[in-house]
Image: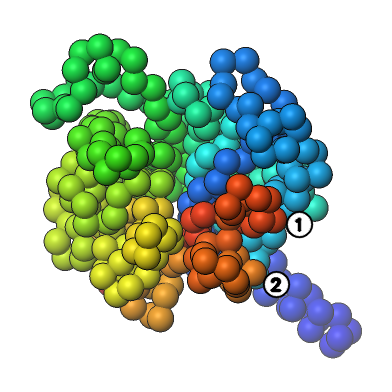
């Protein structure tokens, strides 16, 4: 009888702990971004400039190479899970051709157990690349998603004339709204216009302006909404597109209404980088969070330090992701190098933040 009583007590305690409210659990969520560097399938899509990524194209993009690329991408995501002791709850991605490549990616055996779903919309980009969002339905409940097109409806003084504006095509911005453990979040995934010719600052500024305008509107519509913006911004964290148009701030104390906290400003100053160009390291792969994630009340989600107990952002790098020899040694190991298949990963390293329920006051 005594043993039965002890067993019943243990069972009661176990079931009781399993039924604790969410606020009583210690669970972190990893939110990340990864530029997958030209994740194309092998088939030409009508209207897309993807000829290089076909078996007959310049890159001799065969099913074997495509599957190796998928495996490499999935390996990085698996190893990030090992590092963080958790799969991504949400992962924004860039440079994906279509929904097929994301379906093939989430089905890879390296990451299949994560149970990722994805959201993707075709965009008018001339290269044929889009952004997307991977997420775990068990952790993030999607309520709404939309592709926000680029426009020139701004007071910005653009370099492009009217004809050039009419002909301009770039990636849409992806917005996904949903809940994590009952709290409402809004994610924006962007891949802003390129820096080719050391130009386009005005175009990137407009991208960030579009994001902020949409986010401010949604914050009014959904009081307390927690907003996370991520993407390959083609600018560094302290560049005008970020600071002036997105209203990114280096410290939480500087974040006012309508501003965003950018963990990667201080990290870039400290020498961190996600992408290298002509000997200069940049952090183009940026994640920023709204004031509601900086001044969260006790028991609700906030951002937590993840790098050296100081920085609120992380750059994920493993030795296999780094070019080990040749003129590009020490930089991200790309899929192609010098026109040759390099069996690499990406020309960008992924970034991430971690959100956790706030303790104390």
Q: Nearer the viewer, residue 31 or 11?
A: 31
Q: SS at mark 2?
A: helix
Question: Whole-percent x and y of residue 3?
Answer: 86, 86
Q: Quadrant of residue 360?
A: bottom left
Which of the two marks, 1 or 2, is nearer to us in this view? 1
Which quarter of the rendered picture does the N terminus lie within? bottom right
Q: Nearer the viewer, residue 110 or 115?
A: 110
At 78% across and 38% down in the image, what residue appears? 62
Question: Is residue 265 depicted above or below 227 in this figure?
Answer: below
Q: SS at mark 1?
A: loop
Res 110 label? 1
Q: Are marks 1 and 2 in contact (CB under 8 Å)?
A: no
Crowding at dot 2, Cα within 10 Å, few <14 / some 14-19 / many 20+, comes out as few
Question: Is residue 215 depicted above or below 306 in this figure?
Answer: above
How far separated are the C-alphas under marks 1 and 2? 32 Å
At 35% across and 46% down in the image, what residue appears? 233
Q: Quadrant of residue 346?
A: bottom right
At 75% across and 45% down in the image, what residue appears? 65
């Amino acid at each position: 009888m005594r043993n039965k009583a002890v067993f019943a007590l243990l069972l009661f305690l176990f079931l009781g702990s399993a039924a604790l409210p969410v606020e009583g659990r210690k669970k972190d969520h990893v939110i990340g971004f990864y530029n997958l560097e030209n994740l194309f399938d092998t088939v030409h899509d009508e209207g897309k400039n993807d000829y290089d990524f076909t078996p007959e194209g310049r890159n001799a993009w065969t099913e074997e190479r495509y599957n190796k690329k998928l495996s490499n991408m999935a390996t990085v995501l698996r190893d990030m899970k090992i590092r963080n002791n958790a799969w991504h709850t949400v992962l924004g991605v860039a440079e994906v051709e279509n929904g097929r490549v994301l379906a093939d990616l989430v089905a890879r055996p390296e990451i299949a157990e994560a149970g990722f779903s994805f959201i993707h919309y075709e965009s008018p980009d001339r290269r044929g690349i889009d952004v997307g969002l991977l997420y775990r339905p068990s952790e993030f409940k999607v309520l709404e998603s939309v592709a926000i097109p680029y426009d020139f409806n701004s007071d910005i003084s653009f370099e492009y004339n009217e004809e050039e504006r009419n002909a301009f095509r770039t990636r849409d911005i992806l917005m996904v709204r949903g809940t994590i453990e009952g709290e409402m979040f809004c994610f924006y995934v962007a891949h802003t216009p390129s820096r080719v010719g050391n130009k386009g600052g005005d175009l990137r500024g407009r991208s960030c302006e579009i994001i902020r305008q949409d986010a401010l509107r949604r914050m009014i519509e959904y009081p307390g909404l927690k907003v996370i913006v991520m993407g390959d911004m083609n600018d560094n964290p302290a560049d005008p597109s970020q600071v002036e148009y997105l209203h990114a701030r280096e410290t939480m104390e500087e974040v006012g209404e309508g501003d965003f906290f950018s963990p990667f400003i201080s990290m870039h100053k400290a020498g961190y980088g996600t992408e290298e160009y002509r000997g200069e390291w940049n952090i183009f792969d940026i994640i920023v969070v709204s004031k509601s994630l900086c001044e969260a009340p006790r028991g609700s989600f906030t951002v937590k330090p993840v790098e050296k107990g100081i920085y609120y952002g992380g750059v994920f790098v493993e030795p296999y992701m780094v070019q080990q020899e040749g003129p590009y040694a020490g930089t991200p190991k790309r899929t192609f190098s010098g026109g040759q298949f390099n069996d690499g990963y990406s020309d960008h390293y992924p970034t991430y933040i971690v959100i956790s329920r706030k303790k104390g006051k």
